[in-house]
């Protein structure tokens, strides 16, 4: 009986700590999002081939959403890279100078 009280109290403390402080959201890279999309797509195809249509359709919807998030992430990466490009050129005296492109 005492063990249950300790377990319940521990669970209460941990969950209240997560709710009050707010757990930080994970920010996946575009490569991680691509891997998630591929994994969900494979699971969806496997479920549909095994005849589990409901599970396959739910996984397919998850795959579509993961693919959309992947494309948005890639677009954001490309936009960020485009604005941070630095070009270098050499002057007549041999000095190297840099300028940003847009």
Image: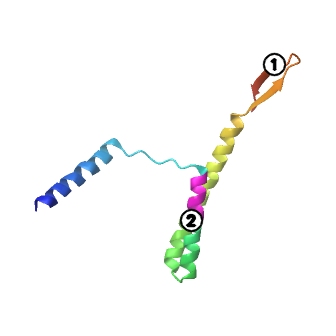
- Looking at the picture, does residue 83 appear above or below residue 74? above
Overall secondary structure of the magenta section: helix
The question of residue 34 being in magenta is answered with yes
- Looking at the picture, does residue 75 appear above or below residue 92? below
Look at 16% across and 60% down and name the residue there.
4
Query: In the displayed structure, does residue 78 sit left or right of residue 90?
Result: left
In the picture of the structure, the residue carrying the numbered disc 1 is 95
Judged from this view, the residue extending furthest toward the right is 92
In the picture of the structure, the residue carrying the numbered disc 2 is 39
Q: How is the image coloured?
A: rainbow
Q: Quadrant of the N terminus?
A: bottom left
Query: In the displayed structure, does residue 13 sit left or right of residue 3?
Result: right
Per the image, label 2 sits on a secondary structure element best described as helix
The question of residue 58 being in magenta is answered with no
Look at 50% across and 77% down and name the residue there.
54
**Of the image marks 1 and 2, the number of the one nearer the N terminus:** 2
């Amino acid at each position: 009986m005492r063990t249950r009280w300790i377990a319940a109290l521990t669970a209460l403390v941990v969950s209240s700590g997560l709710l009050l402080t707010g757990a930080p959201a994970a920010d996946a890279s575009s490569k991680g999002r691509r891997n998630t999309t591929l994994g969900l797509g494979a699971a969806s195809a496997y479920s549909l081939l095994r005849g589990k249509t409901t599970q396959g359709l739910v996984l397919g919807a998850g795959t579509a959403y993961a693919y959309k998030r992947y494309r948005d992430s890639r677009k954001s990466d490309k936009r960020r890279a485009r604005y941070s490009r630095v070009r270098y050129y050499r002057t007549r005296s041999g000095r190297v100078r840099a300028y940003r492109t847009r």
